[in-house]
Amino acid sequence: MFGEPLFVDEIVAWPNGPVVKAVYDEFSEYGDQPLVAIEKAPRLSKTAEEVIANVVLAYGQFSAWKLRDMTHTEQPYLAEAKHRGTISQGRMTDYFRAVLSRPLSRPSDMTTALRDRDYRLSLDRGLEDAAKGRRVKWGDPQPSSTST
């Protein structure tokens, strides 16, 4: 969103989704159990804190399996998944800039926008479209199904 990575670690395409290996190594002992608070939290800029808070707000509602399924539709992951390769920063930047370049995806207040159900549905549609290589104008209506 701001032209620079949030962190420097590589992201690798593993079978169950993108993984930051250092994070996996640190917390894998917990398996599917909740994580405990860590003593040494990294120092983050105000912008980084806001980005993380918005990601949690938007995606914290989903189960691990739903998040896994979502990542499996995104081009940066799909491009590397077969050979467990590194997902490049450039590929992620290009992909998410394409998704976020639609007019409604640049609200003045991201927190407010992510609380708006219509905005979240529109964002999800945009992400799905980009993952499938489609480009449609942001806010285009979904095809409606009519029953006869």
Image (cartoon, rainbow, N blue to C red):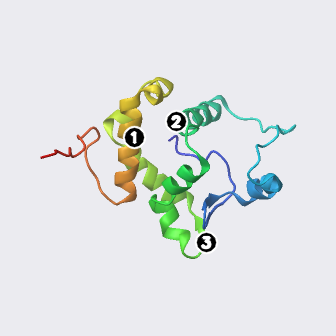
Say which residue appears at 73% left-offset and 51% top-offset. 32
Of the residues shown, which amino acid type is indicated by label 2?
Ala
* Residue where numbered disc 2 is placed: 58
- Residue 25 higher or lower than 115, as above or below: below
* Residue where numbered disc 1 is placed: 123
- Residue 108 higher or lower than 146, as above or below: above
* Residue count near mark 1 (Cα–Cα under 10 Å), binned few <14, some 14–19, many ≥20: many
Disc number lying in front (2 or 3): 2
Q: CA distance from mark 1 to mark 3?
A: 27 Å
Q: Quadrant of residue 43?
A: top right
Q: Which numbered dot is residue 84?
A: 3
Q: CA distance from mark 2 to mark 3?
A: 27 Å
Of the residues shown, which amino acid type is indicated by label 3?
Arg
- Label 3: state its secondary structure: loop
Q: Which numbered dot is residue 41?
A: none
Say which residue appears at 69% left-offset and 57% top-offset. 20
